């Protein structure tokens, strides 16, 4: 049976791999969202937050005498690449990206909520503090996406109805 600390390390590795997947998705989206500058700017901002989160998670793993899982990291990157390539083919990429981003932010919120409890149970106050620092960033991005979604969909629909080439991205 795994100890609380072993569960914590495993879940930290999962979170690190998750953030690697987010990084790849955000990079792909930012590189293609040419016609929605406010969305692109916010994605680039969250990309910087994501890189900071990766560094914080890696510091937790290092402090605990381990590191990220190469297998989980590679799997996450492969999934993100597939999502990025799939997004390129969608005529409504900007809308689908915002919707999937909103859903993924809630996955991250759940992961960091679980990590906060696990770190507390394992007596790892520093990891708990770090996860509590990351959690509001994920919540803020989810709120931004939800708040922005109606205007984004309306803009996409208007551009698409006019047959404009700038609707997709």
Image (cartoon, helix red, strand yellow):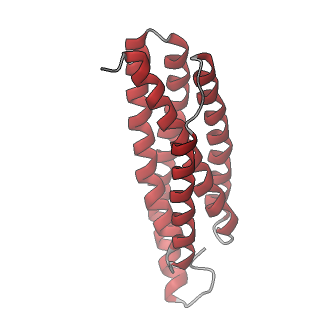
Residue 158: x %, y % from top left: 51, 81
Q: Is residue 72 above or below residue 80?
A: above
Q: Is residue 69 above or below residue 90?
A: above
Q: Would residue 106 be found to the left or right of residue 94 on screen?
A: left
Q: How many marks?
A: 0
- Residue found farthest to the left: 1
Q: Would residue 165 be found to the left or right of residue 103 on screen?
A: right
Q: Residue 83 versus residue 50: which sits nearer the camera?
A: 83
The residue lying at 48 percent from left, 68 percent from top is: 95
Q: Would residue 49 be found to the left or right of residue 78 on screen?
A: right
Q: Quadrant of the N terminus?
A: top left
The residue lying at 49 percent from left, 30 percent from top is: 12
Q: Would residue 135 be found to the left or right of residue 103 on screen?
A: right
Q: Residue 161 versus residue 66: which sits nearer the camera?
A: 66
Q: Is residue 169 above or below residue 110?
A: below
- Residue found farthest to the bottom: 163
The residue lying at 38 percent from left, 36 percent from top is: 110
- Residue found farthest to the top: 123
Q: Quadrant of the C terminus?
A: bottom right
Residue 61: x %, y % from top left: 58, 24
Residue 44: x %, y % from top left: 68, 52
The residue lying at 61 percent from left, 49 percent from top is: 23
Residue 116 appears in the picture as rendered: no
Q: Residue 13 versus residue 147: which sits nearer the camera?
A: 13
Residue 33: x %, y % from top left: 64, 68
Residue 5 appears in the picture as rendered: yes
């Amino acid at each position: 049976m795994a100890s609380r600390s072993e569960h914590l390390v495993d879940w930290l590795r999962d979170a690190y791999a998750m953030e690697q997947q987010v990084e790849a998705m955000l990079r792909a989206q930012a590189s293609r969202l040419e016609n929605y500058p406010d969305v692109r700017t916010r994605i680039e901002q969250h990309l910087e937050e994501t890189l900071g989160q990766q560094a914080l998670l890696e510091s937790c793993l290092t402090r605990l005498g381990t590191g990220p899982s190469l297998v989980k990291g590679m799997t996450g990157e492969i999934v993100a690449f597939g999502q990025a390539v799939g997004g390129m083919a969608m005529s409504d990429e900007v809308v689908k990206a915002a919707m999937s981003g909103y859903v993924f932010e809630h996955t991250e919120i759940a992961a960091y909520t679980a990590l906060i409890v696990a770190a507390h149970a394992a007596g790892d106050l520093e990891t708990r503090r770090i996860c509590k620092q990351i959690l509001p960033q994920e919540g803020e991005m989810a709120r931004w996406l939800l708040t922005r979604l109606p205007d984004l969909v309306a803009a996409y629909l208007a551009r698409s109805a006019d047959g404009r080439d700038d609707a997709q991205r």
